[in-house]
Image (cartoon, rainbow, N blue to C red):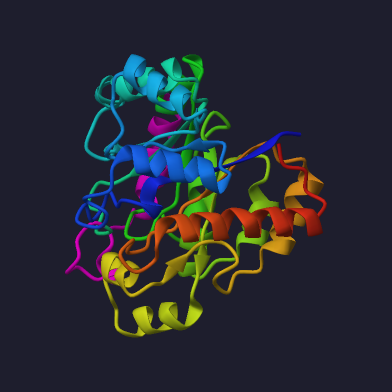
Amino acid sequence: MTIRVGINPLTWTNDDLPSLGAQTSLTQCLSEGKLAGYAGFELGNKFPRQSKELNRILEKHKLALVSGWYSGKLLEHSVEDEIAAIEKHLQLLKECGSKIMVYCEVTGCVHGEQHTPLSNRPTLANDDWSDYGNRLTQVADYCLSQGVQLAYHHHMGTVIETSNDISLLMKHTGDSLGLLLDTGHLTYAGGDPVSEFIKYSHRIIHIHVKDVRKEILEYSKNKNMSFLDSVLNGVFTVPGDGDIDYLPLFKALRESNYSGWLVVEAEQDPAIAEPLTYAKLGFNNIIKVAQLAELPLH
């Protein structure tokens, strides 16, 4: 059982709203992440996409490449076209030692549109799930044959957002497709991270740990806000700084012998939430709760 703690560069610079942290260098991001205690990083928009250069930078900071987000468009593409489109990203992860690709279907998504409320997100018709799941499994089969497993990221503003969406996804896909559990997105969508983990622990291969400020969440839902406006209002924060109780989840991880990464991913405005301060806060809170849960971290 090996669990490592990583972080996403969203703490420093935002991919969906690039103006957040636009002036922050990759060097600052990596050096502060290492200083805070993290063992690895997920990819962000400031990372080079050539494996030789990326490996050199990560080795300099003694960091691992955890994974990298891919914006899937399988609802628009054929299986063959999606595999062709994903190939360059797949090989980059493989050449840099990552075993996980974070995959999310973004066709029609609204999470990057600041003036579009989340209630306008796309959905899949009941008759479409079987075909989509079959084709997604074929893409996952190919990636796994290359040594990198897809971890599907349920995400606010996309076709797979709620607990019911996750259930349908798991029902209609094969085991080659792993599931990413995101505590913040699931809580936002009205789900319970602990029950979802217990239900799908055999498929969950990657975990994003971010906290939610429930008072701001309720306000965001009441105002039918966009995802980005909710982020700017401070709906997310690092573990231990919001209202999610991580102790039951970490106990469930221990009981199921979860092996993989715990990745802090907390979209905030870095001008308000100073990145190093929050990176340290998130890491220290994870260590503290893991000790209480007797969850071994590597």
For the C terminus, the image quarter is top right
Q: Residue 139: image x %, image y %?
A: 40, 26
- The correct choice, above or below, for 272 with respect to 97 in the image is below
Question: Residue placed at 63% from the left, 56% from the top?
Answer: 284
User: Looking at the image, can residue 83 be seen?
Assistant: no
The quarter of the displayed image where residue 133 is located = top left
Task: Check the picture and name the quadrant holding the N terminus.
Answer: top right
Horizontal side of 251 relative to 81 (left or right) equals right
Mark count: 0
Say which of 268 and 178 sits in front.
268
Q: Is residue 260 left or right of residue 153?
A: right
**Above-or-below relation of 205 to 267:** above
| Residue 44 spot, x, y in % from top left | 33, 40
In magenta segment, residue 120: yes
- Give the residue displayed 67% in from the left and 60% down from the top: 194
Give the image location of residue 185, x and y in percent.
46, 60
Residue 209 occupies which quadrant of the picture? bottom right
**Horizontal arrangement in the rendering, residue 52 relative to residue 35 (left or right):** left
Q: Nearer the viewer, residue 93 or 102?
A: 93
Nearer to the camera, 87 or 53? 53
Q: Is residue 129 something one can see in this rendering?
A: yes
Q: Residue furthest left?
A: 115
The span shown in magenta is 112-138
Q: Is residue 175 above or below residue 161?
A: above
Q: Residue at x 39, y 46 (%)?
A: 9
Q: Position of residue 136 (x, y in %)?
A: 40, 33
